[in-house]
């Protein structure tokens, strides 16, 4: 175990009940692109805002056309080393809550159960009229049926099931309405400019209060909805460790920072604190 891995293991050993906050860096090894570079700056134009999506039909057509092409990247993604390691740590009783800023559902797929999806889930679609939900995969079939020419296009994958589909006229893209009430359909995720549901935030803060320390994994914390939990931990005197390649918004608040790949680092941590049982030697 290298010195950095040993320091992280020592941190987790001294603080047995961790509040874990994860970000996009946990899922890049699953093939899902992230938004920010090592300086915490945007790599690409900022995501669509809630106000634009709800208020502009042209924005919704563009969003769903790009999503039609980008969704398979999300649908086919599988848990990577970071997700699996955190599930092992939870099974060993070392994680009180895993609060993820990701919308991909990969922590749950890896076996984590004490989780809160702070920003919702991209695999679910919500009607903004009647509040009914449907699987995103179901909507994908309808989008393909209504827009066969678009379904044949290829584009580079972008974060959160988006695709870099530029230079097209989206005005003819056919976006279905809710089959029950005719309402507007939106991914069941928190867009920029939209508030996280209060009960979700309250549950996360309750878990933070019960934790011994905070472990940030794969997040620059540039979005305030996640950063506020680190602020609250620091204000309460709870130590914070971060595993992240590059700058974070909370660098001055950290007791420990590990600038190494998150999957590698968390796998080493899980092996140190929750080693998998090895097969017993059998007499020949």
Image (cartoon, rainbow, N blue to C red):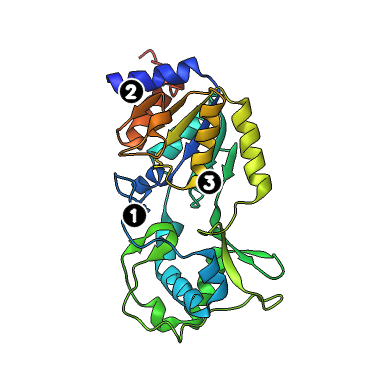
Is 199 positioned to the left or the right of 255 in the image? right
Marking on residue 140: none
**On the rendered image, what quadrant is the N terminus found in?**
top left
| Pair 2/1: label in front | 1
When the figure is inspected, residue 230 is found, relative to residue 277, above or below; the finding is below
Residue 166 in view of the camera: yes
Give the distance between the C-alpha atoms of the residues marked 2 and 1, in whole angstroms.
Answer: 29 Å
Q: Identify the element where label 3 is drawn.
A: helix
Q: Residues within 10 Å of mark 2 (few under 14, many from 20)?
A: some
The residue pinned by badge 3 equals 225
Mark 1 or mark 3: which comes first in sequence?
Answer: 1
**On the rendered image, what quadrant is the C terminus found in?**
top left
Give the distance between the C-alpha atoms of the residues marked 1 and 3, in whole angstroms.
Answer: 17 Å
Q: Residue at x 52, y 73 (%)?
A: 141
Give the distance between the C-alpha atoms of the residues marked 2 and 3, in whole angstroms.
Answer: 28 Å
When the figure is inspected, residue 112 is found, relative to residue 150, above or below; the finding is above
Mark 2 or mark 1: which comes first in sequence?
Answer: 2
Q: Residue at x 39, y 42 (%)?
A: 220
The residue pinned by badge 2 equals 5
């Amino acid at each position: 175990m290298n010195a950095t891995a040993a320091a992280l293991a020592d941190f987790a050993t001294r603080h047995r009940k961790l509040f874990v906050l994860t970000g996009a860096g946990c899922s890049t090894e699953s093939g899902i692109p992230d938004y920010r570079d090592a300086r915490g700056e945007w790599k690409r134009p900022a995501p669509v805002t809630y106000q634009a999506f709800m208020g502009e039909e042209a924005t919704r057509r563009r969003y769903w056309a790009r999503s039609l092409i980008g969704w398979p990247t999300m649908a086919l993604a599988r848990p990577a080393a970071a997700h699996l390691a955190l599930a092992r740590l939870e099974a060993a009783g070392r994680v009180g809550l895993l609060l993820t800023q990701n919308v991909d559902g990969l922590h749950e797929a890896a076996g984590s159960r004490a989780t809160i999806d702070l920003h919702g889930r991209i695999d679910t679609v919500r009607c903004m009229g009647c509040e009914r939900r449907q699987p995103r995969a179901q909507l994908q079939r309808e989008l393909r049926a209504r827009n066969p020419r678009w379904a044949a296009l290829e584009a580079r994958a972008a974060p959160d099931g988006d695709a870099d589909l530029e230079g097209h006229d989206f005005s003819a893209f056919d976006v279905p309405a809710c089959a029950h009430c005719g309402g507007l359909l939106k991914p069941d995720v928190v867009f920029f400019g939209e508030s996280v549901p209060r009960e979700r935030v309250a549950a996360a803060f309750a878990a933070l209060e019960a934790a011994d320390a905070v472990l940030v994994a794969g997040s620059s914390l540039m979005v305030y909805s996640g950063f506020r939990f680190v602020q609250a931990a620091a204000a309460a005197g709870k130590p914070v460790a971060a595993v992240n390649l590059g700058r974070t918004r909370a660098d001055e608040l950290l007791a420990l920072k590990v600038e190494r790949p998150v999957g590698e680092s968390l796998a080493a941590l899980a092996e140190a604190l929750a080693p998998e049982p090895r097969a017993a030697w059998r007499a020949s």
